Amino acid sequence: MPTSSVPVSFWGAFAMKRVILTSSSGVGLAHADRADMVVPFIFRFVSGPLPSAEHLNGYLGGRALRIFEEIIWSDCVRQLPYVQRLDREGALLWFCETYGVELIELWFDPEPNSQLQLIWILDYLRSEPSIASSLRLRRVDFDLRGADPAELRHRDVRELDIKKAISRSRAWPGRPTARRRPSSAPGCSTGRSANCLS
């Protein structure tokens, strides 16, 4: 469902109705008008060195006191005119709360790396029970990378039970989590200055 192109006033800022979290396969969703903001995950879990737990948590945790060369979630998100620059440096979940996000949708296609990213993000989000009611998991059973944004705008994508998905992510013993031993090198495939959507 397309969202309104006019943001709603929210305590002096603007409220965002919907945010989509996706893999790099889903960057086309940013042009499909299905959400106010699309956040792609750029880590590789299927080839090359695995990202460390610190890199994974730092990606969603924001820049704050971190080194400016580190890539965070907002580096891969288009600039929005009603978003304060400093707010883009904060943690993703803090950002969603500050901007009044009502729905956080997870769109991950069947590609293996996307599925591993989904497991990781479900594991990350289960430690944040305050946002559980905002989460929606979409059953993306097609190739997001090759999908036409105009088609994505109107495509009916079924919602799945998020509680079952979180339970299954917890049961997978090899999931990439903060509890696994850190790798020495990040698996990020792009440099600090790159904008994944430009």
Image: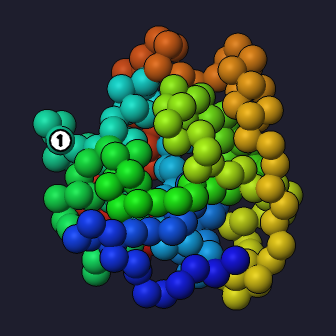
Q: Position of residue 188 (x, y in %)?
A: 43, 44
Tell me: residue 181, above or below residue 93.
above
Above or below residue 133? Residue 25 is: below
The quadrant of the rendering that contains the C terminus is bottom left
> How dense is the environment of label 1, judged by Cα within 10 Å: few (below 14), some, or many (20 and up)?
few
Instruction: Name the quadrant containing residue 153.
Output: bottom right
Instruction: Residue at 26% x, 48% y: name it.
Output: 90
Residue 24 visible in the picture: no
- Compared to 111, does 7 lie above or below? below
User: Residue sitting at 41 percent across and 54 percent down?
Assistant: 96
Query: Looking at the image, which residue is at 40% across and 80% down?
Result: 7
Instruction: Give the residue at mark 1.
Output: 64
Identity of the residue furthest to the front in this view:
11
Image position, residue 120 (x, y; %):
59, 33
Residue 86 visible to the viewer: yes
Name the quarter where the N terminus is drawn.
bottom right
Pick whichever, 113 or 17, lies toward us.
17
Left or right relative to 98: residue 150: right
Compared across the picture, whether 1 is left or right of 59 comes to right
Q: Residue at x 77, y 26 (%)?
A: 168
Give the percent coordinates (x, y) of residue 194: 33, 63
Where's residue 76, x and y in %?
40, 61
Q: The residue under label 1 is which amino acid type?
A: Ala
